[in-house]
Image (cartoon, grey):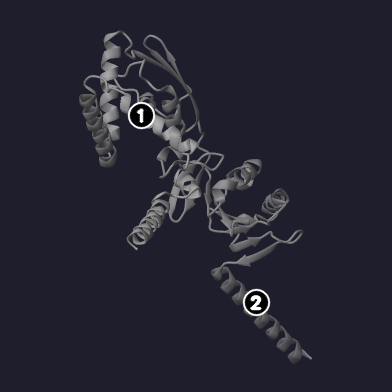
Amino acid sequence: MTARLAGAGADALAHASERLRHRAAPRRDEAYESYARPSALAMRLRRLGMRIMSIRPPRRAGLLATLALFVATGVYGVQRGGHGPTLNAGLLALGDQAANAAGLKVTGVRLTGNRQMSHEHILDVAGIRPDSSVLFFDADLARERLKANPWLADATVQKLYPDQIMISVVEREPFALWQRDGRIHVISADGKVIVDHLDARFQHLPLIVGKGAEERAREIVGLLNDHADVAKAVRAAVLVAERRWTLVLKNGIDVRLPDADLDRAMVDLARLDAERRIMTRDVAIIDLRVPDRVSVRLTEDAMKAHEAALKERERDRARRRALQGQRT
């Protein structure tokens, strides 16, 4: 009995030990799943990290980084504070001083093509100062600044080392006076505003009025130049609804021109004035908009006088009829 119990206990112990061994040891597939090979990207990142860690910073790297931080902070503050132009001007002044000391100071400017703009005005627009140097003078920037001036259609700027600058400009010609919204401007032939106020030097120029009139200045001024007899009586040319012109004569008469065939209308007007002095009569409007027909509207005083004359004529006729009745 004792031997049997001992054998049964040994078998139970062996079975329990086998179960524990199987539980503790992972299965083959589980062991395989627990191990995963790193990806190529992970391996590369790992190698890169090891290389970075192995790099030794140069001497005084911390000082250089601190200086870079201060410089970046200063640049950001200048930009945010709007002090960039002042800083650039200061650096340019220092550069000019150094270049001038080396014999590169601007001592002469050769200027051609200017008639309306003064020599000093052009130098000021181009940015040429008494202490400017040829080395640090920006010719392209000066050209752009000159071309932005309303007086100038084009400009050429060249640096002639060691101490000369050559500037050639093409000025716009004052062509007409343009009135809009109660203000008079001096314009060129292409409609560009040259002077934004009435300059006494240009009071002799033809006056055009209305929105869009500046863009059609060549049309109406050329028409008036071709008919000088009419032009000398014209005070202004008004563009109506950006479509057609009305000539305002110096005596107040309005001459309404058609949308097209303006030359024919001007010829008719000149002929009527030569034959009947129509532009000096007591009329308010001369309408030439309909081809082959001229309509005339009298002034208010002329209309009243005309109506009075008609009434007087009717009275005369009535008196004559009465006298003829009495005789019969």
The answer for how far apart the CA atoms under marks 1 and 2 are is: 117 Å
Q: In x, y percent, where is residue 10?
A: 36, 56
State the residue lying farthest toward the front.
1
Quadrant for the C terminus in the image: bottom right
Q: Which mark is residue 50?
A: 1
What residue sits 65% from the left and 54% below the top? Answer: 277
Image location of residue 172, percent across then percent down? 51, 33
Query: Label 2's element?
Result: helix
- Residue under the point 34% across and 28% down: 52
Q: Residue at x 60, y 44 (%)?
A: 221
Q: Nearer the viewer, residue 314 or 240?
A: 240
Image-based side of 69 in relation to 152, left or right: left
* Mark 1 vs 2: CB contact within 8 A: no
Work out which quarter of the rendered image holds the N terminus and state it: bottom left
Q: Nearer the viewer, residue 301 or 314?
A: 301
Residue under circle 2?
310
Badge 2 amino acid: Leu
Q: Amino acid at mark 1?
A: Met
Relative image position of residue 59 (x, y in whole percent): 23, 19
In this rendering, position of residue 307 left or right of residue 289:
left
Furthest-right residue in view? 328
- Give the quarter of the image for residue 325: bottom right
Which of discs 1 and 2 lies nearer the camera? The answer is: 1
Q: Quadrant of residue 110?
A: top left
Q: How many marks?
A: 2
Q: Is residue 244 above or below residue 120?
A: below
- Looking at the rendering, which quadrant does residue 158 occupy? top left
Q: Is residue 118 above or below residue 81?
A: above
Is 72 on the left-hand or right-hand side of 38? left
Foreground residue among 319 and 46:
46
Q: Is residue 321 visible?
A: yes
Instruction: Please say whether residue 234 is visible from this viewpoint.
Output: no
